[in-house]
Every structure is written in C-alpha cells, then in structure tokens.
Amino acid sequence: MIGADANIVRLGCLLHDVGKVVTEGDEGTHVEKGVQIAKKFKMPEEVVNCIAEHHEDKPFSSVESVLVYVADAISGGRPGARHENVEDYIKRLDDIEKIATSFEGVDRAFAVQAGREVRVIVTPERISDDELPKLVHDIGERISKEVMVPGAVKITAVRETRATETVMSQ
C-alpha cells in the first residue's frame, strides 16, 4: 500500500482535464482553467493540487498528485488516445479492412479496437492452416506501409471448417 487517499485520486483523475471544456475566455491553459473551476466549486485542496500538478507545471505535493499524473500519462500514451477527427478515424478503419480483404482467400475483415486489431476471416478451401502465418504477416506488412496507425496492430486470421448434421429420431 502506498498510503494514497483513493477518493482524492478518483476525483483528481476525473477532474484533471476539466479545464479543457471551458468555453468562456481563451486565457490560460486547461490546467489553469481546471484549477479555477475546482476552486469555484470548492473541491478539496488535494484535488485542486492534483489538477494543478498533472502536467508537472508545479512540483508534486502528494502521492495522490503523482498517481493522477501517472494515470494521465498512461491514458494519453495509449493508441488512439489523442484527438482524431471522425472522418480520418473511419477512413483508417476502412483502409485497414480494404487491405486485408484485398488478399486472395480472404472472405471478410473487421478492424476492431479502434484499428488496433484486425480480424480476418478466410475461406478454408482457399487458405490452408500452413498458409495462415504468411497471410497474417503479409497483411501486417501492407498495413504498416500504407496506413498511419497509432501504436501496434494485431492481425488475427480465422480459418474455420464446420461439419453439421441433423438427425431425426426413428
């Protein structure tokens, strides 16, 4: 246990970027605006400090502030975390799916998890189990060369053969 007040950390994490939603006046950073809002609504001083310190604009005053900073860094560093307009996002997913379906034997492809994973469904009569690793590799190579993707993309190919029989009691 590190001795942090979980409620202060929760509030700090929830409110650390509240200054980004302020529309009146353009003066000040989102940190400065967030501090003003937190003070206006009489948030505890520890929460105000978490907001004020989450970009290291001032030295950390508590373990709670450090935890809010770390949480913000982890969240901001994940693929797809930064602002991207909707049209670019949809185009990227569409481009990934088009690349995957352009390969011989691929029936369908689905970009999932904000384009960080592609599920590729192959026609089992056209692609063997032995051919799957090369197909996945080749799709990955094309995606990495042709699509700007934040972070890594996992390609999963599914080759499924089913046999079904329905019987009636005699």
Image (cartoon, rainbow, N blue to C red):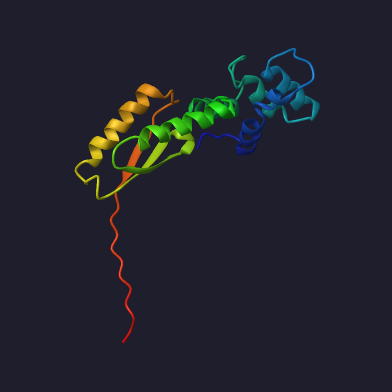
Position of 35 relative to 1 (above/below): above
Q: Residue furthest top?
A: 27
What residue do we see at 30% from left, 53% from top? 160
What residue do we see at 30% from left, 48% from top? 123
Front-most of residues 128 and 11: 128
What residue do we see at 31% from left, 27% from top? 141
Q: Position of residue 164 (x, y in %)?
A: 31, 66
The number of numbered discs placed on residues in the rendered structure image is 0
Q: Position of residue 133 (x, y in %)?
A: 24, 38
Q: Position of residue 69 (x, y in %)?
A: 56, 25
Q: In the visual, does 32 lie left or right of 126?
A: right
Corner quadrant of residue 156: top left
Q: In the visual, does 150 lie left or right of 63?
A: left
**Where is the C terminus found, in terms of image quarters?**
bottom left
What residue do we see at 41% from left, 37% from top? 117
Q: In the visual, does 66 lie left or right of 21?
A: left
Is residue 88 visible to us here? Answer: yes
Front-most of residues 88 and 58: 88
Is residue 80 visible to us here? Answer: no
Q: In the visual, does 112 lie left or right of 7?
A: left
Q: Residue furthest left?
A: 130
Corner quadrant of residue 154: top left
Corner quadrant of residue 20: top right
